[in-house]
Image: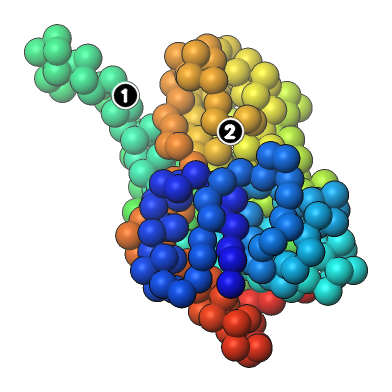
Amino acid sequence: MKVLFAAPEDAWGGILGHFRTALPDVEFIAGGLNPADLSGYDVVIPTMSRIDQACIETADQLRLIQQIGAGLEGVDLDAARARQIAVANVPTDVSGNADSVSEMALYFMLALMRRTSEHAAQREARQLGLPVGRSLHGATVGIVGFGAIGQAICRRLDGFGARCLALKTRVDQALVERHGLAGMGTLADLPWLLAESDIVVLAVPDTEATHQMMNRNSLAQMKPGSYLINIGRGGLVSRDALHEALHSGHLAGAGLDVFWEEPPDPADPLFQLNVLTSPHVAGLTDRSVTGIMQVAADNISALSNDEPLLYRKV
């Protein structure tokens, strides 16, 4: 069996090495889809590569598109279905990914509110007692997207005494009660959540309904001095609008794990403002890499043995 890992050898926490150890009889080839050519492969692991109709039409023996993660927005599911190619993912709540992403979200919140980007300069100036930070206790955190990741963030915030609001496709009263939410709405209620929140966390995929949901209009609806954290997808936020909101001081800061282009330009002047970043690694920890790899490896083994696939979408 031949598997294309559509990313560099060392990408995503070195997960490819784990695959090779777990499946020594499978041939794994690392590399991008440029030009997009799936001929000769039985399985493709797309990572961040787009698997569109033109790409799928190059496949001559492909049987499975196996994502390492939950995101399938880059895969043309209809084209795969038409060619009878199975598509599967790894849900965030079964791999440790949701917990890992939620930890990064908490790191951004604490680091921004406690002004850690200023600490090194204070040390160099031999200054103690500054800067004065803001407490997460009593703050209102609005979580846009209340799936496994949003719920994992909310659980952790409970220990900090924060107040949580959430948006979901449909209001779920059982989730409201289970997590002690101060309120839940749908995406149509975004203005309400923005106006109420000291911190807004984006934890949704980039879809037609959510693309650039954070634009000049919506950023202006956020509380003056509030923070924006994006651990969802880069396309959720307008880069230019974010730059303006930070530069004007309307937003106090931002935490970004994902970007409008990946990788982003390190010389982008936006990064000279109060912005904390991580290189799209929120979901990458020792626990999540092992959990994701195991589910995907089990599916590759199942495919070779003509057994049912886990978490199949097509």
Q: Specify the label residue 135 is tagged with.
A: none
Rendered residue at 59%/66% (across/down): 2
**Viewer-proximal residue, 270 or 216?**
270
Evaluate whether residue 59 shows in this view.
Answer: yes
Residue closest to the eye, 299 or 276: 299
Residue 101 visible, this angle: no
Measured Cα–Cα span from mark 1 to mark 2 = 23 Å
* Residue in the image at 49% along x and 44% along y: 8
Q: Which residue, given by chain and number where applicable, does mark 2 sit on?
A: 262
- The residue mark sitting in front, 1 or 2, is 2
The amino acid type, in three-letter code, at marker 1 is Ser
Check the picture and name the quadrant holding the N terminus: bottom right
Give the secondary structure at mark 2: loop
Is disc 1 placed on a helix, strand or loop? helix
Identified at 39% across, 52% down, the residue is 14
Image spot of residue 138 (x, y percent): 41, 47
Q: Position of residue 301 (x, y in %)?
A: 54, 81
As displayed, is residue 294 above or below residue 258?
A: below
Q: Residue furthest left?
A: 126
Name the residue tied to disc 1: 117
Relative depth, front residue between 97 and 228: 97
Question: Three-letter amino acid code at disc 2?
Answer: Glu
Q: Kindly indicate the quadrant of the structure image that contains residue 197.
A: top right
Above-or-below relation of 247 to 103: above
Q: Position of residue 53 (x, y in %)?
A: 85, 53
Query: Which comes sooner in the sequence, label 1 or label 2?
Result: 1
Pick the residue in front: 210 or 183. Answer: 210
In this figure, which colouring scheme has been used for the structure? Answer: rainbow
Q: Quadrant of the C terminus?
A: bottom right
Residue 222 against residue 160 in the figure, above or below = above
Question: Could you classify mark 2 by the number of other residues whose Cα lies within 10 Å: few (under 14), some (14-19), or many (20 or more)?
Answer: few
